[in-house]
Image: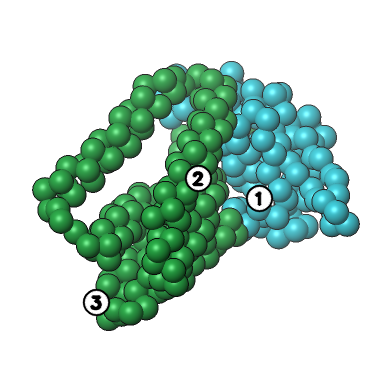
Chain colours: A green, B cyan
Amino acid sequence: MTMTMDRDEAEKALAEIRDARGRADRARSYADASPFFILWGLIWLVANVVTGLAPELSGPAWLAGLAIGSVATVWLSVRQARRRGAQALQEGRDMGEEGARTGMTMGAIALFLMALFFVVWPLDARQMNSAISLFWAFAYLAAGIWLGWRLAAIGAATAAAILFGYFALDAFYFIWMGLAAGGGLIAGGLWLRTI
Amino acid sequence: MDAPDEIIHQSMRLRITSTLNALGPKEKMEFGRLKALLSATDGNLATHLTALEKAGYVDIAKDFVGKKPRTRVALTPAGRKAFARHVAYLKALIEGE
């Protein structure tokens, strides 16, 4: 005997499919974000601690960190884009426009930060460090509102740690930024991998 | 298509195939991760995966990472086609075709 379904059963089944797909996509977002958190957390940790303990090495530490981080970020992004492209091809979607818009968005963000610093210059090292760190912490918070509460929680906790360090700590600011903001990002990245 | 897929139709198997269909073409999902995403028990998930495997809809790969056993699952091409057909059937039913 052939199985049949009515309209209500079909709607319920499609709702189950949407729910399962939503969970899978959220887990994928977490897994994709995780290596970026760990990477930049390590760079923030090392560069800030070096700045705090040996200020004369601050410049080379940040330059090396930003260079390594930028190259690794591009490599990770390309790897993830290739995988998403293969999946999109399988589902009959065109990823070209999405990729171009993502690239343009990142370019717009970089230009915004440069324009902002150009307007508010001069900034001291603590202000610069806090401003960039806060920008990304709130970006994670905003992304988390759309992609999942874990991202939002990491963003909010990191922002709180940065503000505390900036206003409450003076001598230990850079050590705090390394351990709390950098360490927090690493812990957050590992947390995102648990589902 | 004028009938639902009798294998995929069952609620847990529908959620399993929906979740695995979100993976890329060469990706596999670890059993534990799938279990967590579906809030399923070991026994329940294993039972339904076996049914899907018998139908040729999923591929279950078992190996070792060091000394730790690992089970990974993926939809087969036949599984993806069956899932797409089932979804098309559900949509057609709702649209009254």
Give the mark toward the camera: 2 or 3. 2
Amino acid type at circle 3 is Phe
Amino acid type at circle 1 is Leu
Query: In screen coordinates, is A104 left or right of A75?
Result: left
Residue at mark 2 shares a chain with residue at mark 3: yes
| Nearer-N-terminus badge (2/3) | 2
Give the mark toward the camera: 1 or 3. 3
Query: In screen coordinates, is B17 left or right of A156?
Result: right
| Image coords of residue A160 (percent x, y) | 32, 71
Residue at mark 1 shares a chain with residue at mark 3: no
Q: Is residue A186 above or below residue A164?
A: above
Q: Which residue is mark 3?
A: A167
Query: In screen coordinates, is A149 left or right of A119?
Result: right
Q: Is residue A67 above or below residue A127?
A: above
Q: Residue at x 22, y 43 (%)?
A: A114
**Label number found at residue B34:** 1
What is the spatial separation of the Cα atoms under label 1 and label 3, in whole angstroms?
44 Å
What crowding class fits label 3: few (fewer than 14 Cα within 10 Å), some (14-19), or many (20 or more)?
few
Secondary structure at badge 3 equals helix
Q: Which residue is mark 2?
A: A68
Secondary structure at badge 1 equals helix
| Image coords of residue B71 (percent x, y) | 79, 48
From the image, which quarter does the C terminus of chain A lie in?
bottom right
Residue extending farthest to the front is A56
